[in-house]
Amino acid sequence: MLIDSHCHLDRLDLKPYQNDFSCLMEHIRAQQIEHLLCIAIDLEAYPAMRELVADYDDISVTVGVHPNEHEGQEPTIAELIALGQDEKVIGIGETGLDYFRSEGDLTWQHNRFRNHIHAAKTLNKPLIIHTREAKQDALDILREENAGEVGGIIHCFTEDWEFAKAALDLNFYISFSGIVTFNSAKNIHEVAKKLPADRLLIETDSPYLSPVPHRGRPNYPHYVTHVAQTVADLRGISLNSIADISTRNFYTLFKKS
């Protein structure tokens, strides 16, 4: 059984599933996917996302505002804490820094990132970290705010082994997305081979970043099997072994039974 540790279920194209979320979930379960972590991007869409998955015990959620979101509501620490007390919320984020899509004075991104870390520490819930072209600043803020107290996930890992080692030292797990299936992703392949087994997770980030052989088309949670198979091949072990490792790690991080 596999777990998709990062997906955006409220943003999936349901047309292939009769525009019926329950039909999609039946298909996902039939593909041996045991649990899904549905990740928040903003506060405006969060209530509908939470309602969508309310009746599914095999779906957990996070609450947070993506570092590139700048037109919606700015989350305060108090708001994040209030929303994060929901038992279905098992993590805070996604949060972090992104210098690829945002330009100019990004102090607001830094402040938002710190607020998420403060909320996560108050709630004692792991962080879901997004970082792009901002690795040193992201590491600096994680260190300055003692984010290792709660740890979390560096999601959709796209950095190098040096960054991975620093993240491990800060009590974070590394999650591989469909990018690991791309032949050009040599740095990510190296990390997938070297990463300690007890810090490895897999994800889809669906509906984005579809893995080979679905690259260029909408992504779905059950495509996590392709991510798992690629990581297994890189490490020279079986798909079942990666499934066991990543599933155990997910429940260890989020302290689920």
Image (tube, rainbow, N blue to C red):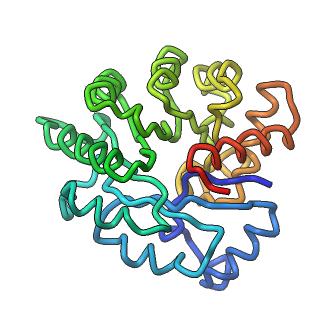
Q: In this rendering, would 168 be left or right of 226?
A: left
Q: Nearer the viewer, residue 106 or 172?
A: 172
Q: Please tell me how many numbered marks the rendered image carries.
A: 0
Q: In this rendering, would 58 be left or right of 166?
A: right
Residue 236 appears at what percent x and percent y? 85, 25
Residue 126 appears at what percent x and percent y? 45, 46
For the C terminus, which image quadrant?
bottom right
Q: Which of 218 and 65 is in front in this view?
A: 65
Q: Which of 223 and 26 is in front in this view?
A: 26
Residue 101 appears at what percent x and percent y? 29, 41
For the N terminus, which image quadrant?
bottom right
- State the residue at coordinates (17%, 41%): 111
Quadrant in the picture for residue 78: bottom left
Residue found farthest to the top: 162
- State the residue at coordinates (67%, 18%): 194
Q: In this rendering, would 236 be left or right of 226?
A: right
Quadrant in the picture for residue 206: bottom right
Does 67 sit above or below residue 60? above
Does 49 sit above or below residue 152? below
Residue 170 appears at what percent x and percent y? 44, 26
- State the residue at coordinates (76%, 72%): 27
Q: Which of 124 and 155 is in front in this view?
A: 124
Q: In this rendering, would 212 be left or right of 242?
A: left
- State the residue at coordinates (30%, 37%): 97
